[in-house]
Image (spheres, helix red, strand yellow):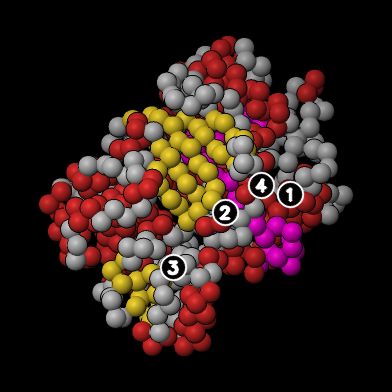
Amino acid sequence: MNDNPSIADQDACYLALKARDARFDGRFFTGVTSPGIYCRPVCSVRTPRRENCRFFGHAARAESAGFRPCLRCRPELAPNTVHWSIQDASGILAHQAARLLDDPDAWCDKDLSVQALADRLGVSDRHLRRIFEAALGVSPMQYLQTRRLLTAKQLLADTTLPITQVALSSGFASVRQFNAAFVAQYKLNPTQLRRAGVSQEQAGTAVKLGYRPPYDVDAMGAFLQRRQVHAVEHVARDTHGHWQFARTLRLVLAGGGVHTGWLVARFDRQHARLLLQVSDGLRGVLPTVIRRTRQAFDLDADPSAINAVLHESFPEGDGLRVPGTFDGFELAVRAVLGQQITVAAARTLAQRLVDRFGEPLDTTLPGLSRLFPTPAALARASAEDIGALGIVRQRQGAIQSLAQAVDQHGLQLTASADVPATITALRALPGIGDWTAQYIAMRALRWPDAFPSGDVALHKALGVQGQKQAARAAEEQSALWRPWRSYAVLRAWSSLAATPPLPMPPDPGSAPPPASRTNARKPTP
């Protein structure tokens, strides 16, 4: 969706609006001139007249044009727009800047500014302002202000958090600053919105998160259920056959604060949304929990853009999403444990690691009682203690070097990380080669163009397994699927779901497995 759509594009938007088509949710917003509000395409109010509608590519653009968010459809619930359709260098840079501004962990940084953002991206602040406004139509600070205000609006409507906590959680320095910004932008003070009683049927710590269909919920459920580690997570269908995801979680903020608790997520397919319930221990970091949840379930994917590139090659995978993670370090450790062994064997090793090094946690949910081990705990652990769990020496070294890199050297395994630099840093660690680094990029860094070209299961799916340079042949094929190669990989793996798992050669950069394990089989990840 262009932020300055043509008349034809606007007419198409209006047709989607009339149909209340959830596939376009978050891809554009409609400003209605008579009441001065902007809505999602799925809004249930009476469809406005065409001449009263203006269309915008994202919420910040609508707000900069003077429109206020609708209190009924609530634009803050819409899936985010990810601008991967722009592949020039300036567009990618603007996207990276937006990803950093989307991260709630950065909102409370007192030094957050365009200059600081530009320094992190290695460009001048003038250049960043220019390319950001050209790509998104607003300045970086306008974009950030909209993200903060919409987050605050969601917390006010869906939770019972005190106004002070809402303000601080949304990145405002004080309640006074928050109130002033809210009134200036929305012509309504925060307490009035809360008294309005919007969405109070699930008050407390339950929030709604939208996504764009199609979404293969069963595939996501099966993927996560097969890999679940007991005491940390529980994935199952409820009595009505609906998938339910529950897990424990530890969040460490940039300032050093630690929050622990649990969450439960359920899919509401009828309304194309995820219902998230969060324990009291995570209430203070709810914006971060919401962002991690969106990433873990890939709620911000744009199926129409992805399918336009991949459908011809993988027509059966239009509803597949790339599973993410709530904890990048946890995902990385489990990826190392999974090298050259089956999914079941890797899950067994992860279970032993949790039982031995995970911190106990009291919860009200049956079966959830521990947190995944921290980087510090695994960095301190002796090789003998880790080896006693059945983890071979090469994996011991990889896990400990990874833990030390995260704990002591600040290696970031999050969606806001510098992807090329992080992949390079991962490959430099002992026991971690390209396959593992690409897998981590795909799931933890949320990089849509990751591609583990050496994967044997991928070779079979692409029909290149018999070639002398299969990895190169796979890489050449993958050029057609940029920038969505992570999704292509998942679709390729899915096409082999009914076949036996294949052997996987040692990850480049890691030592060969012991002779007794050379016949271990590597499953589809």
| Residue 338 at x, y percent in the picture | 66, 32
Q: Please determine whether, in this image, residue 216 is positioned above or below residue 13.
A: above
Residue located beneath label 3 in the image: 44
> What is the count of numbered marks?
4
Residue located beneath label 4 in the image: 218
- Are there few (<14), some (14-19), or many (20+) residues within 10 Å of tag 2? some
Residue shown at 28%/36% (left/top)? 255
Of marks 2 and 3, which one's residue comes earlier in the chain? 3
- Give, as a three-letter code, the residue at label 4: Asp
Q: Residue furthest right?
A: 466
Q: Would you say the residues marked 4 and 1 are in contact, meaning their CB atoms lie under 8 Å apart?
A: no
Of marks 4 and 1, which one's residue comes earlier in the chain? 4
Magenta residues? Answer: 309-338
- Give, as a three-letter code, the residue at label 2: Arg
Is 501 on the left or on the right of 194, as rendered? right
Residue located beneath label 2 in the image: 269
Give the label, 4 or 3, closer to the camera.
Answer: 3
- Residue 124 is drawn in which quadrant? bottom left
Q: CA distance from mark 4 to mark 3?
A: 28 Å
- Are there few (<14), some (14-19), or many (20+) residues within 10 Å of tag 4? some
Give the label, 1 or 2, closer to the camera.
Answer: 2
Q: CA distance from mark 1 to mark 2?
A: 22 Å
| Residue 279 at x, y percent in the picture | 39, 33
